[in-house]
Image: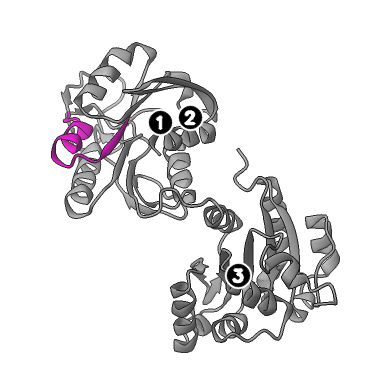
């Protein structure tokens, strides 16, 4: 699934050393289906040769505004571009855009785009001390108030480094998606839980969290405010880190209690049992008997106490009867899949709602798109 298929992105490059990453960024945008038109400031040309971006985009690079009025052709009323993406964006360019100054190719494109009201995304990059400058901070607040999407940089080694290319592309896709989930707060559980057996061993499952990841990123792309409760870390969403089923339950109920959750997606393989915990390390070499105590069903508690729109996942084709029972209990959708899909990039899934059944076979990205489409 190409999230930028049919879209034209103006990739505006300014004079940060992070400009060296734009060749890869252009390739990534094109792999997602975008037509990419590069625009470079004079300072950017001193860092990356325009031929490199011409090769990466397959198009001549705009390095100056000519009689063809390139800024109007792409970002003016009825222009060809769907998105202006300024990456990397220097403190100098941030200040100029905030003040309506357009004395470079990039700022002229920005002034035109903002006047048209088209989507604009900025990815700042500079030294950390510059990023913390009160004037820069105020300019960023102003740009955000205008509806510009400013992607937070990575603060590392005293630098506000430009965001990862994958993160930038997600924000680009979100900007042109129409944001049908805008204003929705979505809570997702993802991956496996690990229940301690002793100080060394845990009882867990083969779940990898791949399905939860693509569901979360697709929801972000569609404009939602996404929180994921899991053991990992996904870009562009709020991550709440947990390990055990008890920790996941506590975190989920806390978020549901304290925040207005619109949609809850139970994609995690939450432990059904907790082993009796042994102190130290169980000696190897002899048979052991482990008592498994059943754990409460988190999804049942959420549906009973918080009542958000709920999407459940059931593992095993023989679970359809239980899936129908969950629909009758109030779930909006139950996604049924088989064990081979765990950890795999694709699989066969059955999306069950009160209106009927939809079978989806393909990548998990396609399944995630079908899930959200079924809720819209």
Marker count (numbered): 3
Q: Nearer the viewer, mark 2 or mark 3?
A: 3
Comes first in the chain, label 2 or label 3 = 3
Comes first in the chain, label 3 or label 1 = 3
The quadrant where residue 326 appears:
top left
Comparing 195 with 82, the one in front is 82
Comes first in the chain, label 2 or label 1 = 1
Q: Is residue 1 above or below residue 275?
A: below
Comparing 164 with 290, the one in front is 164
The magenta region covers: 295-312
Taking the image as shown, residue 297 lies to the left or right of residue 334, namely left
Residue 116 — which label?
3
Residues at circles 3 and 1 in contact by the CB criterion of under 8 Å: no
Cα gap from disc 2 to disc 1, whole angstroms: 6 Å
Q: Is residue 310 above or below residue 346?
A: below
Residue 236 — which label?
none
Residue 342 screen position, x and y as percent: 45, 26
Q: Is residue 102 above or below residue 330?
A: below
Q: Is residue 268 above or below residue 325?
A: below
Instruction: Assign a secondary structure to mark 3.
Output: helix
Mark 1, Cα crowd under 10 Å, few <14 / some 14-19 / many 20+, is many
Q: Quadrant of the C terminus?
A: top left
Taking the image as shown, residue 129 lies to the left or right of residue 32, namely left
Q: Nearer the viewer, mark 3 or mark 1?
A: 3
- Tell me the residue that label 2 is attached to: 343
């Amino acid at each position: 699934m190409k999230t930028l298929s049919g879209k034209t992105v103006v990739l505006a490059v300014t004079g940060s050393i992070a400009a060296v990453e734009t060749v890869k960024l252009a390739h990534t945008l094109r792999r997602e289906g975008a037509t990419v038109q590069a625009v470079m400031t004079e300072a950017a040309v001193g860092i990356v040769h325009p031929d490199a971006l011409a090769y990466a985009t397959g198009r001549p690079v705009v390095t100056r505004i000519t009689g063809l009025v390139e800024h109007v052709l792409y970002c003016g009323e009825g222009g060809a571009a769907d998105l202006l993406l300024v990456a990397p964006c220097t403190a100098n360019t941030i200040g100029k855009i905030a003040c309506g100054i357009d004395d470079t190719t990039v700022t002229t494109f920005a002034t035109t785009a903002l006047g048209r009201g088209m989507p604009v995304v900025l990815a700042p990059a500079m030294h950390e001390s510059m990023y913390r400058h009160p004037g820069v901070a105020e300019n960023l607040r102003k740009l955000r108030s205008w509806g510009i999407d400013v992607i937070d940089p990575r603060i590392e080694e005293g630098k506000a480094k430009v965001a990862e290319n994958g993160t930038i592309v997600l924000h680009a896709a979100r900007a042109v998606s129409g944001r049908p989930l805008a204003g929705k707060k979505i809570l997702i559980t993802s991956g496996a839980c690990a229940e301690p057996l002793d100080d060394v061993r845990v009882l867990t499952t083969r779940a990898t969290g791949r399905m939860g990841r693509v569901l979360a990123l697709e929801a972000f792309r569609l404009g939602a405010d996404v929180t994921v409760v899991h053991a990992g870390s996904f870009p562009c969403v709020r991550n709440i880190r947990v390990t055990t089923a008890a920790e996941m339950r506590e975190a989920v109920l806390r978020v549901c209690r304290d925040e207005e959750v619109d949609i809850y997606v139970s994609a995690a393989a939450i432990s059904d049992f907790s082993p009796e915990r042994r102190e130290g390390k169980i000696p190897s070499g002899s048979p052991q008997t482990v008592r498994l105590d059943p754990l409460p069903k988190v999804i049942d508690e959420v549906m009973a106490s918080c009542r958000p729109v709920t999407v459940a996942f059931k593992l095993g084709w023989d679970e359809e009867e239980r899936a129908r029972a969950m629909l009758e209990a109030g779930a909006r959708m139950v996604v049924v899949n088989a064990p081979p899909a765990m950890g795999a990039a694709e699989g066969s899934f059955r999306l069950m709602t009160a209106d009927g059944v939809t079978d989806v076979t393909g990548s998990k990205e396609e399944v995630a798109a079908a899930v959200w489409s079924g809720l819209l």
